[in-house]
Every structure is written in structure tokens, then in C-alpha cells.
Amino acid sequence: MLLNVENMSCQHCVNSVTRALQSLDATARVSVDLASKQVHAQGNFSAEAAVAALKDADYPATLLDIDG
């Protein structure tokens, strides 16, 4: 899935976003593009769960593409 995460601005943000998604699935693949503020994630979780986990970590996200 492809998510837009506006609040990311540094490596700490990247690490926090990655941890939030991997808390849903420890084997999830997470790739963060800080410049575009986009996150590609693949794991055993729904888009809704990913958005909720990021919101809980103070990184509100919007889903851009379910297959991205």
C-alpha cells in the first residue's frame, strides 16, 4: 500500500513510522521516502490498521493506493 504521511521531517520520523507499521506485523516491509512524504508498506495488516497505527504514533496518514 502507498500512504501519504505529512508530518515526517527527519530520520527520527522515518524510524517512528517504520516502528508503528512493524508493530502490526514484525515482518512488514516498509520503505519511506522522506522527500515525497510517502510510505510504501507491505505486511499482514489492513490499510485501516496501518492508518490507525500511524495516527496513534502522531503521524496522521492518508491512503493513496492499496496496491502501491
Image (cartoon, grey):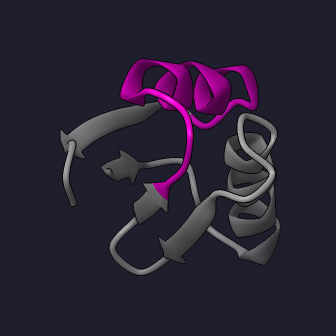
Examine the structure image and report whether residue 47 is included in the region drawn in magenta.
Answer: yes
Q: Is residue 17 left or right of residue 40?
A: right
Using the rendered view, name the quadrant where residue 44 is placed.
top right
Q: Residue at x 42, y 19 (%)?
A: 48
- The total of numbered circles placed on residues is 0
Q: Residue at x 41, y 64 (%)?
A: 40
Examine the structure image and report whether residue 43 is included in the region drawn in magenta.
Answer: yes
Above or below for 23 versus 26: above
Q: Is residue 12 left or right of residue 56?
A: right
The x and y percentages for residue 4 are: 34, 50
Above or below for 26 versus 47: below
The x and y percentages for residue 20 are: 75, 42
Using the rendered view, name the quadrant where residue 30 is placed.
bottom right
Above or below for 32 versus 54: below
Q: Nearer the viewer, residue 5 or 40?
A: 40
Q: Is residue 41 left or right of residue 55?
A: left
The x and y percentages for residue 55 are: 61, 23
Q: Residue at x 44, y 61 (%)?
A: 39
Q: Nearer the viewer, residue 35 or 24?
A: 24
**The C terminus - image quarter:** bottom left
Give the residues drawn in magenta, as a range.
42-59
Q: Residue at x 19, y 52 (%)?
A: 67
